[in-house]
Image (tube, rainbow, N blue to C red):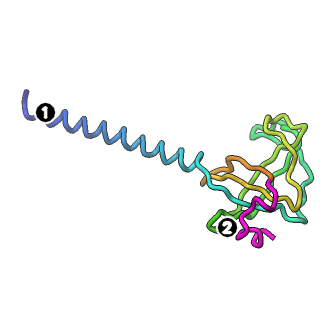
C-alpha cells in the first residue's frame, strides 16, 4: 500500500467522523432547543378577554373554538419571558381541547427556547412565593 492511499483513507475517515459528529451535535442542539423546557409561571390578567374565537390551521381549515394567549411569565430565576399559548376549547376538532384559562388563574407553562411544550392551571399556592407578587 502506498503512502498516498493511506493519507487519502485517513483524510476520508476524518471527514466522515467530522460529518457524523457535526450532524449529531446539530441534532442534539435542535432537540434541546425544541423539546427540553423550563417551567414558567404566569397569571391571566384580570381584564384579559378570553372570549373563544374560531381557530384556523395554516391551510385555512376551521379547527373550532379556541384562544391565543400572550402572557408575561417568569421562571424560577425570576427571568421574564413573553409566551404565546394557543388553547383549543371544548367543541374544537383538536385532541388537546380543554377549558380555557380564565382571568386571574395561575398557569405553569413548560416552554423550550422555541415553543410552549405544555401547560396547566395551578393554584396560587403552587406558584413560588418569590413570583406571586410579580404576577399580580
Q: What residue is at 53 percent from the left and 48 percent from the top?
A: 32
Q: Quadrant of the C terminus?
A: bottom right
Residue at the disc numbered 2: 80
Which secondary structure dominates the residues rendered in magenta? helix
Relative to 105, 26 lies left or right: left
Residue 98: name its quadrant. Answer: top right
**120 vs 77: above or below:** above
Relative to 105, 73 lies left or right: left
User: Of label 1 and label 2, which has the lower sequence position?
Assistant: 1
Camera-side residue: 67 or 80? 80
Q: Which residues are magenta?
A: 122-136
Camera-side residue: 132 or 46? 132
Residue 108: name its quadrant. Answer: bottom right
Q: What residue is at 67 percent from the left and 67 percent from the top?
A: 80
Is disc 1 surrounded by few (<14), some (14 to 19) or many (20+) residues within 10 Å? few
Residue at the disc numbered 1: 6
Q: Quadrant of the N terminus?
A: top left
Amino acid at each position: 500500500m502506498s503512502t498516498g492511499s493511506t493519507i487519502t483513507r485517513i483524510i476520508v475517515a476524518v471527514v466522515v467522523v467530522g460529518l457524523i459528529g457535526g450532524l449529531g451535535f446539530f441534532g442534539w442542539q435542535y432537540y434541546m432547543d425544541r423539546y427540553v423546557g423550563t417551567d414558567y409561571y404566569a397569571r391571566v390578567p384580570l381584564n384579559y378577554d378570553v372570549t373563544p374565537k374560531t381557530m384556523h390551521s395554516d391551510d385555512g381549515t376551521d379547527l373550532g373554538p379556541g384562544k391565543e394567549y400572550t402572557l408575561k411569565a417568569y421562571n424560577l430565576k425570576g427571568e421574564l419571558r413573553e409566551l404565546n399559548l394557543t388553547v383549543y376549547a371544548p367543541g374544537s376538532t383538536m385532541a388537546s381541547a380543554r377549558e380555557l384559562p380564565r382571568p386571574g388563574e395561575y398557569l405553569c407553562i413548560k416552554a423550550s427556547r422555541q415553543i410552549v411544550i405544555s401547560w396547566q392551571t395551578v393554584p396560587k399556592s403552587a406558584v413560588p412565593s418569590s413570583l406571586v407578587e410579580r404576577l399580580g
